[in-house]
């Protein structure tokens, strides 16, 4: 298939606009089309050129306004008529962002592409809440899993995950929190294990709830926690008060030039 354009899968980071990478910003500034997700900070879209076409394909919990196969088709369609197409995704495109599925579609269609990594909320979001995913005295490793598997796919084996050492980070798990907590406890995880939920990580309305695994569900219900939120379980949570900080606003230049994106 003859195409005239290139697709850039760009990670928009966890939410704070100043955590966007320099290359991501340059690609956005030179895009002819931006196809973006719901969790992308809308301020990022202010960097596009006046004649850039913006397409919202955001997914709300339990409702996908644009099915994945239609998003794939949009990428192919606009690559045939435009030069630079940016597929803007929250966090990192390859961390539970379906980026690999979209790239597979581009490869099948013979469309040039490039992936621009972004800061994942599973790491950067927790850091901004004062929670390091590793610590030499507490966690020599970490595990990042989704709390929401594709319909028809097997659920996570939470009882097996309960046996792993290190920090357990769960994304997209709030709707399934009762089951997750029950299964982790049934798997042998101590109810006294430190736990936390970080809602809207890195954003102005960020909230952090710290407790234990045994009280996590009741505390989350009392605090009316809603997505997007990260669940983290492990000893590193005990550092959150000591390591928390107030982010400083970084002023970014309005215009930057990127030869590879032009």
Image (cartoon, rainbow, N blue to C red):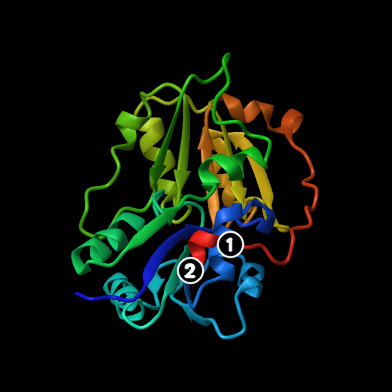
Location of the N terminus by quadrant is bottom left
Q: Which mark is on residue 176?
A: none
Q: Residues within 10 Å of mark 1 (few under 14, many from 20)?
A: many
Q: Which residue is mark 1?
A: 26
Which residue is located at x 48 percent, y 53 percent? 174
Is 235 or 124 nearer to us in this picture? 124
Question: Considering only order in the chain, which callout, 1 or 2, is on the residue closer to the N terminus?
Answer: 1
Whether residue 121 is visible to the viewer of this picture, yes or no, is yes
Is 187 or 25 nearer to us in this picture? 25
Whether residue 60 is visible to the viewer of this picture, yes or no, is no
Which residue is located at x 41 percent, y 52 percent? 176
> Residue 143: x percent and y percent?
42, 33
Looking at the image, the residue that sits furthest to the bottom is: 51
Tag 2, which secondary structure?
loop
> Residue 164: x percent and y percent?
38, 24
User: From the viewer's perspective, is residue 189 above or below residue 5?
Assistant: above
Is 119 or 24 nearer to us in this picture? 24
> Residue 63: x percent and y percent?
40, 73
- Total marks drawn? 2
Which residue is located at x 74 percent, y 36 percent? 244
Looking at the image, the residue that sits furthest to the front is: 259
> Residue 214: x percent and y percent?
52, 34
Which residue is located at x 62 percent, y 84 percent? 50
User: From the viewer's perspective, is residue 54 above or below residue 40?
Assistant: below
Quarter location, residue 69: bottom left
Tag 1, which secondary structure?
helix
Q: Which residue is mark 2?
A: 37
């Amino acid at each position: 298939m003859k195409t005239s354009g290139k697709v850039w899968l760009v990670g928009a980071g966890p939410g704070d606009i100043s955590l966007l990478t320099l290359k991501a910003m340059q690609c956005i500034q030179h895009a002819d089309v931006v196809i973006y997700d719901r969790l992308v900070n809308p301020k990022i879209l202010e960097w596009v050129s006046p004649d850039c076409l913006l397409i919202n394909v955001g997914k709300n919990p339990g409702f996908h306004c644009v099915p994945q196969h239609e998003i794939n088709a949009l990428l192919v369609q606009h690559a045939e008529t435009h030069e630079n197409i940016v597929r803007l995704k929250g966090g990192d495109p390859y961390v539970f962002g379906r980026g690999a599925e979209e790239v597979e579609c581009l490869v099948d269609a013979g469309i040039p592409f490039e992936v621009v990594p972004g800061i994942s909320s599973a790491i950067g979001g927790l850091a901004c809440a004062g929670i390091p995913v590793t610590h030499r005295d507490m966690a020599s490793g970490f595990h990042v899993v989704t709390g929401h598997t594709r319909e028809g796919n097997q659920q996570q084996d939470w009882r097996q995950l309960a046996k792993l050492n290190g920090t357990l980070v769960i994304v997209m798990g709030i709707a399934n929190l009762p089951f997750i907590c029950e299964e982790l406890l049934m798997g042998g995880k101590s109810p006294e294990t430190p736990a936390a939920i970080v809602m809207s990580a890195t954003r102005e309305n960020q909230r952090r709830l710290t407790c234990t695994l045994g009280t996590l569900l009741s505390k989350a219900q009392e605090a009316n926690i809603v997505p997007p939120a990260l669940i983290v379980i492990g000893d590193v949570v005990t550092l959150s008060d000591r390591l928390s900080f107030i982010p400083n606003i970084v002023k970014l230049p309005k215009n930057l030039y990127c030869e590879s994106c032009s």
